[in-house]
Image: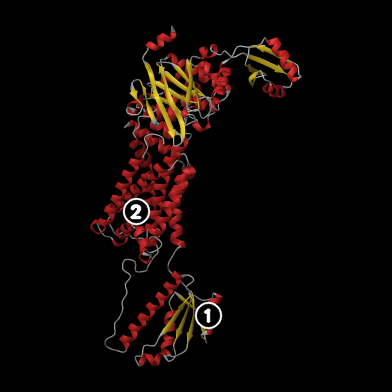
Amino acid sequence: MLNENQLMNKAFVNINKVSKSYGEVQALNDINFSVDESELFGLIGPDGAGKTTLIRILITMLLPSSGSASINGMDVVKDFKKLRHLIGYMPGTFSLYEDLTVAENLNFFATIFNTTVKNNYHLIKDIYQQIEPFKDRRAGNLSGGMKQKLALSCALIHKPEILFLDEPTTGIDAVSRVELWDMLKELKKQNLTIIVSTPYMDEAQLCDRVAFMQKGEVMEINTPQQIVEDFDTPLYAVKGNNFYNLLLDLRKMELTKTAFPFGDSIHLTTFEKYDSAILNDLIMKFTGQRTHTERINANIEDCFMEKMLRNEA
Amino acid sequence: MKAFGAFIRKEYYHIIRDPRSLLILIGMPIVQVILFGFAITNEIVDAKISILDKSKDAVTQEISNKILSTKYFLLSEYLEDSKQIAQSFKKGEIKLALVFEDGFAEKLHKNENPSIQIITDATDPNTAATLSNYISRILVDYQGQIALNSFTPGGIKVVTRMEYNPQLKGVYLFVPGTIVIILMLISAMMTSISIAREKEKGTMEILLVSPLKPFMIIVGKVIPYIFLSLTNAITILLLGVFVFGLPIRGNYFLLFFEITLFIITSLSLGIFISTKVKTQQEALLISLMGLMLPTIILSGFIYPLESMPKLLQYASDVIPAKWFLIMIRNIMIKGVDIRYILNETLILLGMTVLLMMLSIKSFKIRLE
């Protein structure tokens, strides 16, 4: 039902056969998808997958080599002037003026978008309040998480209709990461469309829908729930004393499809389905160490790992 | 318009909050003028010379005395033999040697044109040329005197007058020159660096995504530097006038018009550089190597353009500083009005328009 509703909504962002190449290098290859209004959409993929390039095309900063894209019916190439009024953008690296104070940065970005901090204070209140005690401090002296909040405030101060965040959680601590996603969820409630890129696969489940990107292509677009449900490879968590040797040994076994360390256990996928006790015996016999094996449900990272490897092969 | 004001305020903060750079920007012109003023002078005082007088008569004695009585020369020794000349030079004791030929007075009275040989140490060619000039002038002077005394009719008297700068003061040369270098440095280098910094730090990306027009970004960038450059030009002029006694004979308004024009030319150059580079380092290198060196060498500030090979003379035509230097010297020292420097003004104006058009054309409204 949900999907049908989404189809009936007019898509807010439309990406149509977008490709981008830098000389020989194909950064994006035939990207097609759409994002609905007030959707929190994730671009997930490893470094070099083309996430930043795609975002830069959408924010009118890069021209696609071929194909077209539009936001709210406006073409990102032809109507770039109009679009620049309604886009909020937070680049991957902290790109505010470090020699200006927090308040000066915010005022500057409000003014160049022809508005004032007062007018739109309600938009950023929740976020900005956390850094307001430091408003006279120079932005260069803020911690990573506070910088991120300031950057987000500056990107939101002109009441954009769509917000682009390029790897907002790269290089900040775990607490700030959680806070940032909470903030995004709050913003979504105010009908803001958000497109966010991240190399962290666990963050995918915080999005409404994700596009999984690799080597310049979109491999899959789906809701995180659906991606997990669709995972049909048998998956087991294996624990052992000699973790590293166990990993190497597991990778040598013929029944093994993939084996990856995951926290305190190894996530093992196999070509065929096994009873966990039987599998455990097989593993103990092969590795010669005591192990514990159980069948588990896949989380989103397992799904992406599997997809990534499938594409590499 | 409000956005534009905010932009200029931001630039002002950038400049004011980097005290080290600001100190250099404001202090550099002062230090440069004082250094040039006191350290670099073309006047040579107390140069040691040797005299080899083969004639030893009243005339050679008189000429020697005349030369040694000036402040320019000091006698090292009288030589007896022409072999000693080379020795004195090698020892580095003397800058110049004078050789009077045999029977000097006798030949003079017989109208036979006796000769004096001037030998200089041309390891430093500028000094050598200046010293031999001094001697020639003294000799011409002396010739004039005896011509008068003997009531000999005829004979041509050469009168050289150094117009506008009779004492050949160096300050006339280096104050305009310093203005050129400082303005070039601040206007072109600082703007190119400051725009490159926005690119490097990623803030340019955000500015571009904003509705700010690219034209506003550029104009907002340069306005604070126009003021900074003007302040520096005034500081240098004041120092030149009050410390070194430089005259400003021309119209002040015209002078400031031309200075402002040159500042804008340099700014356009800076903007043009910034459209071509990605990092501050590149901007710095290109401004220094690509702008400062040609400006210093090919503007006529230090080396006279007339004595350069034709090819370099043509090359100097594209250096804005050359035209500016001609104008500013003419206005300050000769006191000419706009009619006499119209060509130069138009050339500079043309360069500015061209550079601006090129910059606007190559300013990227997107990345890449």
Q: Residue furthest left?
A: B339
Is residue A100 visible in the rendered structure shown here?
Answer: no
Is residue B111 visible in the rendered structure shown here?
Answer: yes
Residue B16 found in image quarter: top left
Examine the rendered structure and indicate whether residue A179 appears above or below residue B259: above
Specify whether B339 is left or right of A72. left
Q: Of helix, strand and loop, which one carries label 1?
A: helix
Examine the rendered structure and indicate whether residue A20 appears above or below residue B300: above
Residue A254 found in image quarter: top right
Examine the rendered structure and indicate whether residue A221 appears above or below residue A107: above
Q: Where the N terminus of chain A falls, by quadrant?
A: top left
Chain letter for the residue marked with disc 1 in the picture: B
Q: Which one is in front, A190 or A21?
A: A21
CB under 8 Å between discs 1 and 2: no
Give me the residue at 48% from left, 42% from top.
Answer: B19
Where in the figure is residue A30, as x and y percent of width and height? 43, 25
Q: Amino acid at mark 1?
A: Ala
Mark 1 burial class by Cα count in 10 Å: few <14, some 14-19, many 20+: few
Specify whether B156 is left or right of A217. left
Where in the figure is residue A164, as x and y percent of width and height? 44, 24
Examine the rendered structure and indicate whether residue A111 appears above or below residue B194: above
Where in the figure is residue B69, as x and y percent of width and height? 44, 79
Give me the residue at 46% from left, 54% from top.
Answer: B31
> What residue sits right under mark 2 in the picture?
B320
Q: Amino acid at mark 2?
A: Pro
Question: Which disc, if any, is residue B86?
Answer: 1
Q: Where the C terminus of chain A falls, by quadrant?
A: top right
Chain letter for the residue marked with disc 2 in the picture: B
Mark 2 burial class by Cα count in 10 Å: few <14, some 14-19, many 20+: many
Residue B168 found in image quarter: bottom left
- Colouring: secondary structure
